[in-house]
Image (spheres, rainbow, N blue to C red):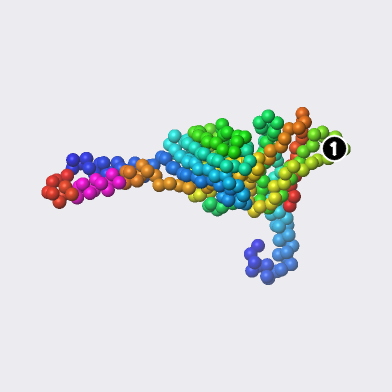
């Protein structure tokens, strides 16, 4: 036990430092557009970026749009966080399989970030330097710094009826591992108090 | 050129500054590029989606005509007004004829 406990603590800290999953939430609305759009439409989604599997797992639901959905994308990078607009990052002409022609719906998809055609060509060349790795890094950076937004375009609003910037959520695995580490220290201290040697 | 050097030789600065400004203007114009329709696709049973990107501080006008005959005028269907940031637009147009031609113009 004396050698196992430090090893477990070290493993926890190492695993925590090498987190592979970055989670984001997104709240979409008309007032979030730039310039703001008068719309009763709303939406909520999640985006999980896995930097080891090189995937983007996306899910969103929306309702009450004024126009029918035409397309949807993730746009990035804006110049400053959580403001203004930018061109399409993924995917052009639209996210694959995104339902259109309705004022409400839901969507779930896993994008492969190791493929060139996942990215809009302008983003790929200008932000990504013309490489898949560069494009993935540029997208990851934009998401992490609040400069990426999910936009749903409609027949009512050609530049987008509802949108929301991706907002990072605390990484559950890191929190869990950190909690386990603290628990380990607590157990060790408690055991020392009782005179047991760990 | 550094401002302090301009104050010492104002006219020379202006003479050298003008070509610099011209080069800068040409460079920015080249960066913006001509207006371009990225993508046109059929949408639902009788509609078309026209995609285009916009550069900051420019107004874009999307137009169509059903025949390229010179007597047939271009008709404006959508104007993307100038904003100080880039954007992407998707305009819906109804298919009322077997063919239709689109063009995108830009105004400063």
Please tell me whether the stretch drawn in magenta is mainly helix, strand or loop. helix
Mark 1, secondary structure of its residue? loop
Expressed as whole percent of the image width and height from the top left, the position of residue B59 reads 71, 49
Is B63 displayed left or right of A47 in the figure? Answer: right
Judge left or right: residue A108 versus residue B10.
left
Quarter containing the C terminus of chain A: top left
**For the view shown, which residue lies furthest in the bottom direction?**
B8
The image position of residue A118, as x and y in percent, is: 55, 35
Determine the residue located farthest toward the right in the rendered image.
B71
Residue A120 in sight here: no
Q: Residues within 10 Å of mark 1 (few under 14, many from 20)?
A: few
Instruction: Give, as a single range, the part of the protein colored magenta.
Output: A179-189
Q: Which residue is mark 1?
A: B72
The quarter of the picture where the N terminus of chain A appears is: top left
Judge from the rendering whether residue A180 lies leftward or rightward of residue B27; answer left or right: left
Q: In the image, is residue A22 part of the stretch drawn in magenta? A: no
Q: Residue at x 72, y 44 (%)?
A: B78
- Residue A184 within the segment the image draws in magenta: yes
Q: Position of residue B3 (x, y in %)?
A: 64, 66
State the image coordinates of residue B84 (x, y, percent, origin top left): 64, 53
The residue drawn where x is 85% and y is 37% is B72
- The residue closer to the viewer here, A175 or A161, is A161
């Amino acid at each position: 036990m004396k050698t196992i406990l430090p090893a477990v603590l070290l493993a926890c800290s190492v695993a925590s430092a090498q987190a592979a999953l970055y989670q984001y939430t997104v709240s979409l609305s008309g007032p979030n557009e730039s310039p703001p759009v008068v719309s009763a439409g709303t939406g909520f989604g999640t985006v999980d970026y896995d930097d080891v599997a090189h995937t983007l797992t996306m899910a969103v639901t929306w309702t009450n749009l004024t126009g029918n959905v035409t397309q949807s994308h993730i746009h990035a990078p804006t110049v400053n966080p959580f403001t203004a607009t930018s061109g399409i990052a993924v995917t052009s002409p639209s996210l694959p399989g995104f339902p259109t022609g309705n004022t409400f719906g839901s969507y779930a998809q896993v994008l492969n970030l190791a493929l060139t055609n996942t990215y809009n060509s302008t983003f790929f060349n200008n932000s990504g330097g013309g490489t898949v790795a560069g494009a993935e890094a540029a997208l990851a950076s934009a998401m992490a710094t609040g400069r990426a937004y999910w936009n749903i375009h409609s027949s009512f609003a050609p530049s987008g009826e509802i949108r929301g910037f991706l907002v990072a959520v605390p990484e559950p695995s890191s929190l869990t591992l950190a909690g386990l580490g603290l628990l380990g220290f607590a157990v060790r201290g408690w055991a020392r108090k009782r005179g047991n040697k760990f | 050129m550094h401002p302090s050097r301009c104050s010492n030789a104002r006219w020379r600065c202006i003479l050298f500054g003008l070509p610099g400004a011209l080069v800068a203007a040409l460079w920015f114009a080249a960066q913006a590029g001509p207006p371009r329709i990225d993508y046109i696709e059929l949408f639902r049973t009788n509609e078309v989606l026209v995609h285009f990107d916009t550069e900051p501080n420019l107004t874009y006008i999307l137009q169509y005509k059903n025949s390229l005959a010179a007597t047939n005028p271009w008709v404006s269907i959508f104007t993307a007004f100038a904003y100080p940031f880039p954007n992407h637009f998707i305009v819906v147009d109804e298919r009322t004829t077997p063919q239709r031609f689109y063009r995108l113009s830009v105004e400063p």
